[in-house]
Image (cartoon, grey):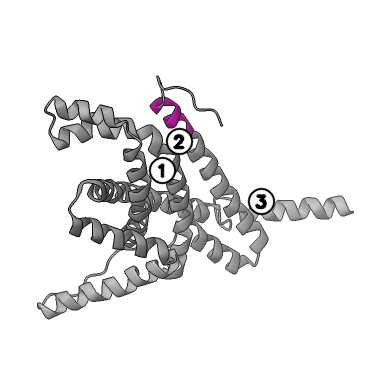
């Protein structure tokens, strides 16, 4: 009797997670795809901002260093959820007000672009400090030798600094990637259809909260494990020829 009831419940759960209607599996996978796309865009934008911020903090003038210090301090001090609300609503409204004052029509920023921009700004502040520490770990003798050969600052960064700092930066960048994948869940508060929002919709419609949130947790876990494996491979490749570091 109990076995039959358990089998019926399991079948009902599987029906809810099927890809075809009335299952919600396709919606969860689409939400996961949106989360990955936002994470990739935000991580890439964060790398660009972080690289510029790290070099600016190390080699820029006093004004630039002070501005970057304010940027990294404020972003790291304010919770990500508050930053998302400020950047998503306040900045969008400010841009539209400026456009209206010049006689232009309002613009509607897509959820994907807004999510990438907001999380990219957050990622950039953390990436600045990760990359700054990695650059400082590059042996000074290597940089001095490159300068003695007459390398320009751009060539020095491309040929010496960036390749040598990569192995030191990858562990921290791996952590930032995982943070980016989890921070996409915060975009649910602005209604963007990433994985958490899709899960909430499915659970609210079916009242099967345990089933759908466990499924979402499993998808996040698979994404994290796969990402960790890829970053570990990249770190091993970047450390080829270097002395092995044992914990």
Q: Earlier in the sequence, mark 3 or mark 1?
A: 3
Disc number for residue 14: 3
| Position in image of residue 96 (x %, y %) | 21, 75
Q: Mark 2 and mark 1 in contact (Cβ < 8 Å)?
A: yes
State the residue in front, 47 or 8. Answer: 47
Please give the residue where the numbered disc 1 appears in the rendered image.
Answer: 173
Q: CA distance from mark 2 to mark 3?
A: 33 Å
Report whether 143 appears left or right of 165: left
State the residue in front, 183 or 163. Answer: 163
The residue carrying pointer 2 sits among few (fewer than 14), some (14 to 19) or many (20 or more) residues within 10 Å by Cα, namely some
The residue shown at (21%, 25%) is 145
Residue 97 drawn in magenta: no
Quadrant of the image for the C terminus?
Answer: top right
Please give the residue where the numbered disc 2 appears in the rendered image.
Answer: 231
Report whether 199 appears left or right of 119: right
The residue shown at (41%, 26%) is 239
């Amino acid at each position: 009797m109990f076995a039959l009831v358990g089998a019926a419940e399991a079948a009902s759960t599987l029906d809810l997670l099927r890809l075809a209607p009335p299952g919600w599996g396709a919606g969860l996978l689409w939400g996961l795809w949106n989360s990955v796309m936002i994470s990739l865009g935000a991580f890439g934008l964060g790398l660009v901002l972080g690289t510029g911020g790290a070099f600016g903090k190390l080699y820029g003038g006093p004004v630039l260093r002070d501005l970057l210090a304010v940027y990294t301090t404020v972003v790291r001090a304010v919770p990500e959820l508050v930053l998302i609300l400020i950047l998503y609503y306040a900045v969008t409204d400010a841009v539209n007000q400026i456009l209206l004052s010049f006689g232009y029509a309002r613009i509607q920023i897509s959820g994907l672009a807004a999510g990438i921009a907001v999380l990219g700004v957050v990622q950039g502040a953390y990436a600045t400090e990760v990359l700054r520490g990695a650059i400082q770990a590059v042996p000074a003798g290597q940089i001095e030798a490159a300068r003695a050969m007459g390398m320009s600052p751009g060539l020095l960064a491309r040929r010496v600094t960036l390749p040598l700092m990569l192995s030191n930066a990858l562990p921290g960048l791996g952590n930032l990637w995982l943070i980016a994948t989890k921070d996409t869940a915060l975009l649910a508060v602005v209604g963007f259809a990433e994985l958490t929002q899709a899960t909430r919709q499915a659970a609210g419609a079916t009242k099967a909260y345990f089933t759908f949130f466990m499924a979402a947790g499993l998808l996040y876990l698979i994404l994290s494990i796969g990402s960790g494996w890829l970053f570990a491979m990249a770190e091993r490749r970047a450390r080829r020829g270097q002395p092995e570091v044992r914990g």
